[in-house]
Image (cartoon, helix red, strand yellow):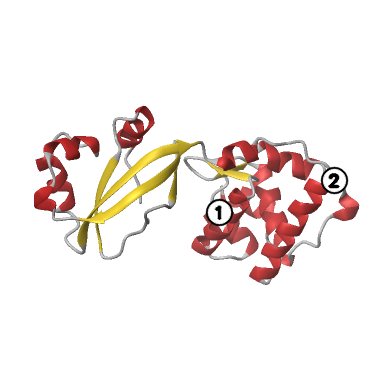
Amino acid sequence: MLFREKVLAGIADGSVTLAFRRWTRPTVKTGGTLRTPIGVLAIDAVEEINEDAVSDNEARQAGHADRSALLKELATRPDGLCYRVRFHLAGEDPRIALREATDLHSEGRAKIERQLAALDQSAGMTWTLPVLQLIAARDGTTAAELGAAIGVEKQKLKTRIRKLKELGLTESLTVGYRLSARGRAFLDGMSLSKDRPRHAKADGAEDTIRSSS
């Protein structure tokens, strides 16, 4: 469930508290949460409705000029049923605070290492450390570049990098990725003697990215 920048601004100032979507299956549920660029939304209600019952006032609460503008947008998605979603801004995305947490004591560092090892094991290859090192080498490195460097398809790697973001180690840019302050602190504190084995395709990967830039 995505929002345009103008609507996000309305959510931030409290003027937008509704959304209308046409779905074959709702992508949010009552009592759930939704992360957005401005913070976490708490989903208060998800209700199937008849779009003919939508009022001008509700349309404005969803960030539209009036009911006609809302219905015009819904008409661009002919499949599915119409749903009204009520929500409120619950607070900042906890990942923001996490990625600024740079005081990594030995227990915290060991926890991150265990989490990365689990991600590597799940993927059947050692990809986490090579990817972090490649992102550290150049802000804005894209998933396509990273995927080519370590031999992983772009979309699959994007899904994996989201897991690094969940750990507070990376953040997305308009194009590509960069390490968070936490990610840099983690890499900076790594002892070479404790480096986990790198995947074979990661060797020379930075040169691969440079040559393709």
Q: Is residue 6 above or below residue 112?
A: above
Discs 1, 2 touching: Cβ within 8 Å: no
Left or right: 53 in relation to 5: left
- Image quadrant in which you'd find residue 118: bottom right
Say what secondary structure mark 1 lies in.
Answer: helix
Q: Residue at x 17, y 51 (%)?
A: 74
Image mark for residue 106: 2
Left or right: 159 in relation to 97: left
Q: Between label 1 and label 2, give the one nearer the viewer.
A: 2
Image mark for residue 89: none
Q: Is residue 181 above or below residue 30?
A: above
Residue 86 image point, x, y percent: 30, 45
Residue 150 image point, x, y percent: 64, 62
Amino acid on which the number 2 mark rests in the picture: Ser
Give the labeled residue for mark 1.
162
Query: Which one is earlier in the sequence, the residue at label 1 or at label 2?
Result: 2
Q: Residues within 10 Å of mark 2 (few under 14, many from 20)?
A: few
- One can see residue 203 in this view: no
Q: Is residue 195 above or below residue 39?
A: below
Amino acid on which the number 1 mark rests in the picture: Arg
Say what secondary structure mark 2 lies in.
Answer: helix
